[in-house]
Image (cartoon, grey):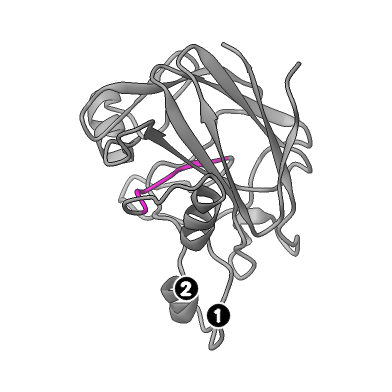
Amino acid sequence: MSTLVTIPARRGKAAHVRKGEAVKVINTHGSQVVDTWAFVAGHLIEFMSMEHTRATLTKLRPVKGDHLYTNKRRPILTLREDTTNGIHDTLMAACDNERYGLLGCTDYHDNCTDNLYAGMRELGLTAPECPSPLNLFMNIPWTDDGALSFEAPQTKPGDYVVLRAELDCVVAFSACPQDILPINGVNTPPTEAHFEIVAG
């Protein structure tokens, strides 16, 4: 029986996922962006890469059935199910303390980069770097002239995606602590999200 794991608001979590298993990522309250990473087990310098995924898929957003590729151009995850309207982001880097400084913060701010490292440390692992994540549920629309904007998610409470592991891997998540821009909703504080390891 699978166990539901909480990704606490503003914090990170990680888990081992074996090839053929899948991870179900749940937007529990409907407005929470979940930064998502995957690293090859035992070889963390190979990891899910948004740059390589976009080049292989020749699209900006993965859809059901698409693989997500590593920096060695191997499939590491497959998007098996998606109950959202398909709006996720592959363009934006994980937020970090420096990003919040540019947004006007003068004190330390919780951030997805530190959450990645913290989640991996709970497993006794050290991420070699912070790759650009798959930003599940994040709404970054673009215009014909290339302009981008940060908008609120279009998800509902309980919406989820299922990602099947194509390699033994370590997946990591951050319930994004962004509370200056509206990416977690307008006037909505960051909330918890959940995941569980399920049959692929």
* Front residue of this view, candidates 106 and 60: 106
Q: Toward the viewer: 146 or 75?
A: 75
Mark 2 = which residue?
97
- Whether residue 135 appears in magenta in the rendering, the answer is yes
Q: Is residue 153 left or right of residue 119?
A: right
Q: Is residue 193 left or right of residue 199?
A: right
Write the residue at 54% across / 83% down. 105
Residue situated in front as seen by the camera: 140 or 64: 64
Residue at the spot of label 1: 108
State left or right for residue 134 relative to residue 174.
left
Q: Quadrant of the N terminus?
A: top right
Name the residue: 42% across, 45% down: 133
Task: State whether residue 178 is above or below residue 109.
Answer: above
Residue type at the position of mark 2: Asn
Q: Which circle's residue, 2 or 1, is located before the other in the chain? A: 2
- The quadrant in which residue 188 appears is bottom right
Boundaries of the magenta span: 130-136
Figure disc tally: 2
